[in-house]
Amino acid sequence: MKILLLGSGGREHALAWKMVQSPDCSSLFVAPGNAGTAAIANNVAINPNDFDAVKEFVLAEQVGMVVVGPEDPLVNGIYDFFKNDAALVNVPVIGPSKHGAELEGSKEFAKKFLVKNNIPTAAYDSFTKDTVAEGCKFLETLNPPYVLKADGLAAGKGVLILENLEEAQQELKNMLVDAKFGDASSKVVIEEFLDGIELSCFVLTDGKNYKLLPTAKDYKRIGEGDTGLNTGGMGAVSPVPFTDVEFMQKIEERIVKPTIEGLQKDNIEYKGFVFIGLIKVGDDPFVIEYNVRMGDPETEVVIPRLKSDLVKLFTAMANDKLDEAVLEIDERSAATIMVVSGGYPESYEKGKVISGLDKVEDAIAFHAGTKQDNGSVVTNGGRVIAVTSYGNNWDDAIKKSYQNIDKLHFDKIYFRKDIGFDL
Ligand code: AMP
Ligand code: GLY
């Protein structure tokens, strides 16, 4: 079967690396891909949000499955686009329907879904331009810090955590009245602050059956000690060391099962990944957010630990037979460290020649923001390469990744030297 994977980051390189190992994948196309995917698959210059271009390619190449990496094509309805097109209806799309993608596309939709299904989450209320005054009063009833979330997709920047009441009230006005995050903040969810340690759990579902993938923890801030601006993620480890059997059972019983049952109750079609952002408060898990795709860089540690054939799992999902599939996990730990362009997540330069990739040993260099340029691999984004290693424990895995990062060079290279510091 020919497969088309949409996206261009480290997540997509890791998914591509796994899929090309499957005997069921005769050729893999990645749109638009990066220099890493170009080395193992065929990159095609298509924008994943240009559904007509995706259609034309799928029909011309007789692609048998489309796997969606990032959230925006899902939130824009690529699943439904295929389902409602007579020429495409038999080509499975791995991802949720547009309705299901609202779990990530709208914070308010996600909160309503959580509450309706009795899934533990922070108490909340939501407000619009017309109810700013009520929102300001609601803030007065809460204890600091105050958590404000733009309802829509805001490129990971839509959540504000503020210590001071007046500042929180001012930011609420900035979001609702002055459209601080554009349309995404025309509605704002205000929620109770949960104090604990974060982790993520990943689930594969066909909408009815599910399989748990390994847990992971990512490091979002640019600076050491979790300081400075938020990024897409500077590193990740899997499994998360503070998840014992009892805690995992709580996650499965209180969160994963009611999530899948909730999809069924609402007739939401969903054949994809569910990425559940959790916070451990005391010994109990609470949901902070849903994402309807894999995480990046979490994919770079979760997928290397999957021993089973990912394409066979996707086929089982497409056929509503995930219960019959086998999911085997590598017992080893995996860690990834993200190498980024100096300046990221603010402005940075592109086009810097990357050297040392051929010296990486006993580790995998997943490309994130790279491209080929006159025979060289050059930087082409903020996050550039994720170096993943296995180890007998997280510490061992992290050390191996750092040893390999020392071999990589490009102008203004930066990476955090303390991934795992809190474990
Ligand atoms: P989100 O985009 O919803 O994942 O939020 C971004 C980040 O804000 C999360 O990774 C958490 O670190 C933090 N956060 C979100 N909601 C809460 C909450 N209710 N309590 C504490 N921290 C939160
Ligand atoms: N690393 C966080 C995310 O992919 O959303």
Image: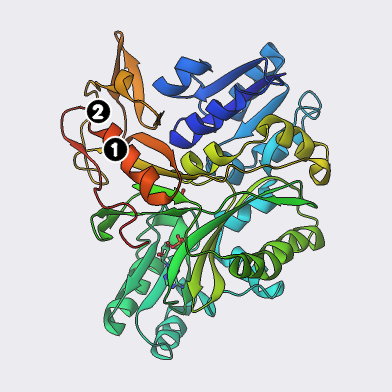
Query: Which quadrant of the picture is home to ligand 1?
Result: bottom left
Residue that badge 2 annotates: 408
Looking at the image, can residue 338 be seen?
A: no
User: Could you say whether the residue bearing mark 2 is in a helix, strand or loop?
Assistant: loop
Q: Residues within 10 Å of mark 2 (few under 14, many from 20)?
A: some
Amino acid under disc 2: Leu
Q: Residues within 10 Å of mark 1 (few under 14, many from 20)?
A: many
Q: Residue 339: which disc?
A: 1
Residue farthest front in this picture: 392
Question: Residue 4 vs residue 395: left or right?
Answer: right
218 w.r.t. 326: above or below: below
Question: Residue 222 vs residue 136: left or right?
Answer: left
Residue 320: percent from left, percent from top: 83, 42
Residue closest to the eye, 283 or 201: 283
274 w.r.t. 188: above or below: above
Residue 352: percent from left, percent from top: 21, 24
